[in-house]
Amino acid sequence: MLSRVAEEIYWAGRYIERAENTARLIRVNSNLVLDAPTVVSLGWEPLITITGLEGSFAEHYKNPTERNVVKFLIGDTHNPSSILSSLAFARENFRTVREIIPRTAWQSLNKLYLFAKESVQAGLTQKGRDDYLEGIISGSQQLNGLLASVMYHDEAWHFLRIGKDLERAEMTTRIIDVRSSDLLTDSDELFNHSGLSSIEWISVLKSLSAYAIYRREIDVQVRRTPILEFLFNNSRFPRAVSYCLDSVEESVGTLAHNTKPLKALRSVVRQLNTQKMENMKQDVLHQYIDELQIKLWKFHTALAKQYFLPEVALAEKAE
């Protein structure tokens, strides 16, 4: 497979997943703001932090108001990670490799992009936002299901899967990191005893569509340590970090010349398997997530050097 084709498909997988994740974040935050006690003022700035776009947001907006944040994340073309931008990039990537993508998948993505573009103004309103976000989420899920069921499971499909699951793993770590700390600190008595902790952790689970399955399979009570163990290490929940990386490892394992990417990936997996979540304070959790994200980036870099930038990999081998 040409390196250009592999890269286009890999990034298409990431962009489709990014659009869905962003829609999930906005929808859950809307509900969290409504559910929080009146003594606590919850804002929209944490969503910018989760997506890592503080600098880009500050260039175009003065204040992180609800309307500004929602506009930035849904339809701002200055934001390369907005829902509209992500779907536009995914559509362009699919267009350039249409001979590999099933026709029905191309049509499904094109339909989803047109919906996102034509309905964006309705999505910016409080009245139309929920329907818009549901359309993005359900459309992304239908597209991923279609790709899994009709796309030939060759190298192209594995690169698509790697992109999707790596993006999902990164977003899960970001949600945990920011959502577990953006209300109050661990030591704050109000946070620990007024129910705010439960509300915040419920929002983490709901951001990942994990609330119902967590209560059914793990614990009826919403508690920090079991949630962290579930979202980092569960091998059966599709949005848990461990599940995502197992999926990535399986796909990388099918590729030729995979020694360096697999080595980088297994470094992340070892860290997941050895870290204990019990009694982990917020500062320790934050440092742990930082280390995970750095290792995920190193894996992405190793993958890019091996398959997307072959001249770089060849130069390194020659040294």
Image (spheres, rainbow, N blue to C red):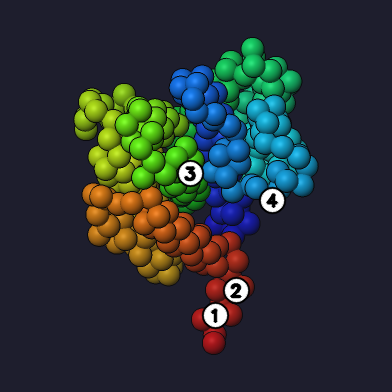
Q: How much space separates mark 4 and mark 3, taking CA atoms?
A: 17 Å
Question: Residue drawn 32% across and 60% down?
Answer: 271
Residue tagged by mark 2?
312
Q: How much space separates mark 2 and mark 3, taking CA atoms?
A: 35 Å
For the C terminus, the image quarter is: bottom right
In this rendering, the answer to whether 31 lies above or below 285 is above
Q: How much space separates mark 2 and mark 1, taking CA atoms?
A: 6 Å
Residue type, label 3: Val
Q: Mark 4, residues whose alpha carbon is within 10 Å: few (<14), some, or many (≥20)?
A: few
Q: How much space separates mark 1 and mark 3, taking CA atoms?
A: 37 Å
Residue tagged by mark 4?
55
The numbered dot on residue 316 is: 1
Q: How much space separates mark 2 and mark 4, taking CA atoms?
A: 30 Å
Q: Is residue 277 visible?
A: yes
Q: Are marks 2 and 1 in contact (CB under 8 Å)?
A: yes
Q: Quadrant of residue 119?
A: top right
Of badges 1 and 3, the one in the foreground is: 3
Q: Is residue 256 visible?
A: no
